Image: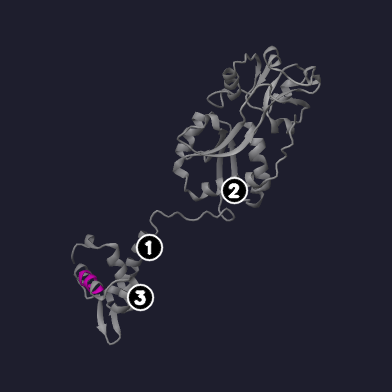
Amino acid sequence: MADISSLDYRQLRVFDTLIEERSVTKTAQRMGLTQPTVSAVLKNLRLVFDDALFVREQRGVTPTVKAEFLAPQVRDVLFRIETLGSEPDFDPAHQDRQFSIVARDFAQVIVIAPFIANVLKDYPRIHIAIHALPMAEAVERMASGAVDLAISSLRYAPERLKQRLILKERYVCAVAAGSALAQQTTLTRQDLETHSHVSASALSMTVGDPVNDLFKTAGIRRDVRVAVDGYLLVPRMLQGTEFIAILPESLVRTSYFPLRAFPMPVEFPDLHMALLWNGRVHNEPGNCWLREQLIRFLDERAVDRTPVC
């Protein structure tokens, strides 16, 4: 037997097609080759396997015992080559899968909670683990595959991650509804500088505080009296005080605690939230399915956009 490493994909396909068609002419037609080319391939196959492989009969060719022995092996090799690099489809209705998502409390409430209530209820075999991690750690875990997705302010999204804008929120000034500040018709730049603030700085959660950074850019002095780890505690911290907080508008709209909102007295960019994932899972079927479901849900859901101020 000659060196089997001399075989290539086309030669194996000729062999497999001859097994099916039992005809050199039909094999040539089916593969878009000339009959002399098929005959030349068959000659080489005979040398490699040291066997006639196919013998001429009145109506075509008949495989030898060795050819019939080789046929399932050749077909298996062809299948492996033709499916090389392809991944099995993800079937969320019949597969168990746990996804891990990193998100701050604001994104957990505004994005993930309604997504779970409206979409995941139809997929009982899908489980979600939500983590509040520093962005640096989230990036490391996404690289290792321990975390599937993250939701973060686009301002601090690492460029090496894949990104998709999913949410745009207006910032507003929020105060306790029972405060003296709430009785004013507007809040001014001077109010921002003379009154203390509650900040959702969450320095452990990200590489910086976007609100503090934007205040510095605007040249506004900010006295942060209370800094909490996340947004959800801020409305409670405002109660019984004359403090001010800068919050995404939807958080004020959905707050359990009574708040009064004012438009920002200075130009202030919107909060842009992005869906982030590592390029290594960009084409992984399960990750693709989760991203598509999240994005479709956010694009289609009816959101209350009534201004709070």
Q: CA distance from mark 1 to mark 2?
A: 32 Å
Asked if residue 264 is positioned above or below residue 222 in the image, the reply reads below
Residue 247, image x and y in percent? 67, 27
Image quadrant in which you'd find residue 179: top right
Which residue was labeled with disc 3?
A: 20
Which residues, given as a range, are shown in magenta? 38-44
Q: Please state the total of marks drawn on the protein image.
A: 3
> Could you tell me if residue 280 is visible in this image?
yes
Nearer the viewer's eye, disc 3 or disc 2?
A: 2
Identity, as a three-letter code, of the amino acid under mark 3: Glu
Q: Nearer the viewer, residue 259 or 121?
A: 259
Kindly give the residue lying farthest to the top in the view shown: 194
**Along the horizontal axis of the image, is 52 left or right of 213?**
left
Q: Using a 10 Å C-alpha cutoff, classify the residue at mark 2 as few (fewer than 14 neighbours), some (14 to 19) or many (20 or more).
A: some
Name the residue rendered at 70%, 41% in the picture.
303
Q: Earlier in the sequence, mark 3 or mark 1?
A: 3
**Mark 1 and 2 residues: CB-CB less than 8 Å, in contact?**
no
Evaluate if marks 3 and 1 touch, with contact meaning CB atoms under 8 Å apart: no
Residue drawn 73% across and 39% down?
Answer: 304
Label of residue 18 in the image: none
Instruction: State yes or no: discs 3 and 2 in contact (Cβ < 8 Å).
Output: no
Q: Secondary structure at mark 1?
A: helix
Q: Which mark is residue 293?
A: 2
For residue 79, which numbered disc appears in the image? 1
Q: Nearer the viewer, mark 1 or mark 2?
A: 2
From this view, report whether residue 228 is shown above or below residue 59: above
**Is residue 9 rendered magenta in the image?**
no
Give the spatial CA distance, label 3 vs label 2: 43 Å
Image-quadrant location for residue 269: top right
Q: Where does residue 132 sit, x and y in percent of width and height?
A: 58, 31
Earlier along the polypeptide chain: callout 1 or callout 2?
Answer: 1
**Residue 21 placement, left or right of 295:** left
